């Protein structure tokens, strides 16, 4: 009998990438645009390399954040 035991308990904790808010992502993207090294960014913002890659993929800027705040 071959059963798939897919009843694993889900974690209630957010993943490391989900812990980053939009303002922090915008700050990290700005630091990358200013030419800071990735090692410096990792140590200054206390993030890991996967979170840095997540920030690179997300297209969040301060202008987008301020537009959302003005619309509300």
Image (cartoon, helix red, strand yellow):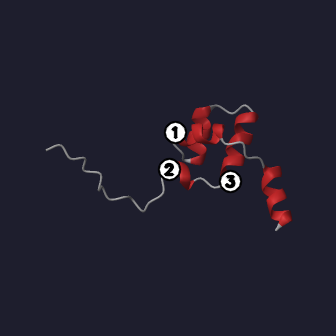
Q: Nearer the viewer, residue 44 or 64?
A: 64
Task: Tell me the SS state at disc 2.
Answer: loop
Percent x, y for residue 7? 29, 56
- Label 3 – label 2 distance at C-alpha: 14 Å
Task: Tell me the SS state at disc 3.
Answer: helix
Instruction: Choose the circle earlier in sequence order: 2 or 1.
Output: 2
Residue 67 relative to residue 39: left or right = right
- Label 3 – label 1 distance at C-alpha: 16 Å
Q: Compared to 70, does 23 lie above or below?
A: above
Mark 2, other Cα within 10 Å: few <14 / some 14–19 / many ≥20? few
Instruction: Choose the circle earlier in sequence order: 3 or 2.
Output: 2
Q: Which residue is mark 1?
A: 50
Mark on residue 40? none
Percent x, y for residue 62? 79, 50
Q: Which residue is mark 3?
A: 22
| Picture residue at 61% right of the left edge, 33% below the top | 38
Q: Quadrant of the N terminus?
A: top left
**Is the residue under label 2 in contact with that under label 3 (CB below 8 Å)?**
no
Percent x, y for residue 65? 78, 55
Q: Which residue is mark 2?
A: 16
Residue 15 relative to residue 21: left or right = left
**Is the residue under label 1 in contact with that under label 3 (CB below 8 Å)?**
no
| Picture residue at 55% right of the left edge, 55% below the top | 19
Q: Quadrant of the C terminus?
A: bottom right
Q: Which picture quadrant has residue 43?
A: top right
Mark 3, other Cα within 10 Å: few <14 / some 14–19 / many ≥20? some
Percent x, y for residue 22? 68, 53
Task: Tell me the SS state at disc 1.
Answer: helix
């Amino acid at each position: 009998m071959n059963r798939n035991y897919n009843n694993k308990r889900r974690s209630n904790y957010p993943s490391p990438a989900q812990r980053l808010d939009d303002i922090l992502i915008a700050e990290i993207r700005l630091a990358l645009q200013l030419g800071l090294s990735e090692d410096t960014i990792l140590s200054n913002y206390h993030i890991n390399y996967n979170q840095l890659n997540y920030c690179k993929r997300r297209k969040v800027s301060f202008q987008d954040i301020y537009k959302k705040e003005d619309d509300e």
